[in-house]
């Protein structure tokens, strides 16, 4: 049985309807086995904050609809593997609809 560890996930948050400035929120997420950034975002949405917005579609890296910046590195949330604390930001801040969801 694999050991569960906890990581801190700091997410960029911004809702142009209610927020004047972007902010960062940090969540604690249990990690067991291999988890992608997308798995972590889903966990946050289900267990901590259902208002967290992000895109995902195919979950296999084919559609490229889940681009994020993790610890300063651009990639797809469905392909990037989590192994420690992370900071998740949008790649295109100027195109943000809300949180990590861009158009």
Image (tube, rainbow, N blue to C red):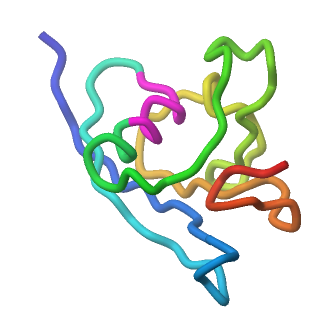
Left or right of residue 4, residue 43 in this image: right
Task: Return the x and y of residue 96 as percentages of the image width and height.
Answer: 78, 61
Left or right of residue 51, residue 55 in this image: right
Task: Return the x and y of residue 1 as percentages of the image width and height.
Answer: 12, 10
Question: Relative to residue 88, is residue 45 depicted above or below?
Answer: above
Task: Return the x and y of residue 51 as percentages of the image width and height.
Answer: 45, 56
Tell me if residue 49 is in the magenta stretch: no
Left or right of residue 6, residue 36 in this image: right
Q: Nearer the viewer, residue 64 or 8?
A: 64
Question: Relative to residue 24, is residue 36 depicted above or below?
Answer: above
Residue 21, picture quadrant: bottom right
Q: Residue furthest front?
A: 17
Q: Residue at x 35, y 38 (%)?
A: 43
Q: Residue furthest left?
A: 1
Q: Residue at x 35, y 55 (%)?
A: 49
Q: How many marks?
A: 0
Residue 58, picture quadrant: top right
Residue 34, picture quadrant: top left
Q: Residue at x 50, y 27 (%)?
A: 36
Question: Relative to residue 11, is residue 62 depicted above or below?
Answer: above
Question: Relative to residue 51, is residue 55 depicted above or below?
Answer: above
Q: Dominant secondary structure of the magenta stretch?
A: helix
Q: Residue at x 61, y 25 (%)?
A: 78
Tell me if residue 37 is in the magenta stretch: yes
Q: Which residues are magenta?
A: 35-42
Task: Return the x and y of residue 22 as percentages of the image width and height.
Answer: 64, 78
């Amino acid at each position: 049985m694999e050991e569960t560890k906890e990581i801190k996930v700091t997410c960029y948050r911004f809702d142009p309807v209610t927020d004047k400035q972007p902010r960062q929120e940090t969540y604690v997420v249990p990690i067991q086995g291999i988890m992608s950034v997308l798995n972590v975002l889903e966990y946050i949405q289900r267990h901590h904050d259902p208002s967290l917005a992000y895109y995902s579609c195919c979950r296999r890296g084919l559609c490229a609809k889940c681009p994020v910046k993790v610890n300063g590195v651009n990639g797809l949330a469905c392909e990037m593997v989590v192994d420690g604390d992370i900071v998740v930001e949008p790649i295109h801040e100027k195109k943000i609809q809300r949180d990590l969801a861009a158009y």
